Image (cartoon, rainbow, N blue to C red):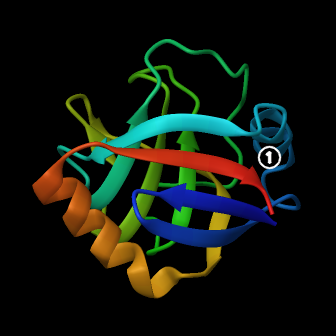
Amino acid sequence: MIRITAGPFTFLARFEDKEAPKTCAAFQALLPYRQRIIHVRWSGEACWIPLGDFDFGLPYENATSYPAPGQILLHPGSVSETEILLGYGACRFASKVGQLAGNHFLTVTEGAENLMNLGKLVLWSGAQDIVFAAA
């Protein structure tokens, strides 16, 4: 399990080790991980962490373009920059180059009722601190 603190909200999530083992291992090596989360531009109801040209050295695994609320994706880079996406509502993962797919490696299991509130906070109030840490 992992604890995610984003703005004033706390979530618990599980790693999708079976479906995305390489992505989970790479991300776990970074814990605790601190960043800022901002609202997406093209993907609908989601927030993201832009990581530029950071190279995790990952292939696509358990990739999707349509994350359900609470699914967290890692786009390993290539046609668009590396990024982490957290869906909170209707979402089709995309960038200025078009539709993307990301590795679904985390799923929120507790606190999901606050995902929409987090999304609205980020949309209307701007970037929020986010911390991923072992629970």
Q: Position of residue 105 (x, y in %)?
A: 69, 55
Q: Identify which residue is drawn at 73% across, 39% down.
A: 32
Number of other residues with Cα within 10 Å of mark 1, as a class: few under 14, some 14 to 19, many 20 or more: many
Task: Judge whether 14 appears above or below 72 on screen.
Answer: below
Q: Quadrant of residue 62?
A: bottom right
- Measured as percent of width and height from the top left, residue 131 is found at 58, 47
Q: Is residue 59 above or below residue 107?
A: above
Instruction: Name the image quarter holding the C terminus.
Output: bottom right
- Identified at 82% across, 41% down, the residue is 28
Q: How far across and how far down the image is residue 90, in percent?
A: 28, 73
Q: Is residue 124 left or right of residue 44?
A: left
Q: Residue at x 57, y 15 (%)?
A: 54
Q: Position of residue 7 (x, y in %)?
A: 40, 57
What quarter of the picture does the N terminus occupy?
bottom right
Pointer 1: what residue?
Answer: 24
Q: Quadrant of residue 114?
A: bottom left
| Total numbered labels | 1
Residue at the image position 80 percent from the left and 46 percent from the top: 24
Outermost residue toward the bottom in this view: 113
Front residue (pair 49, 60) = 49
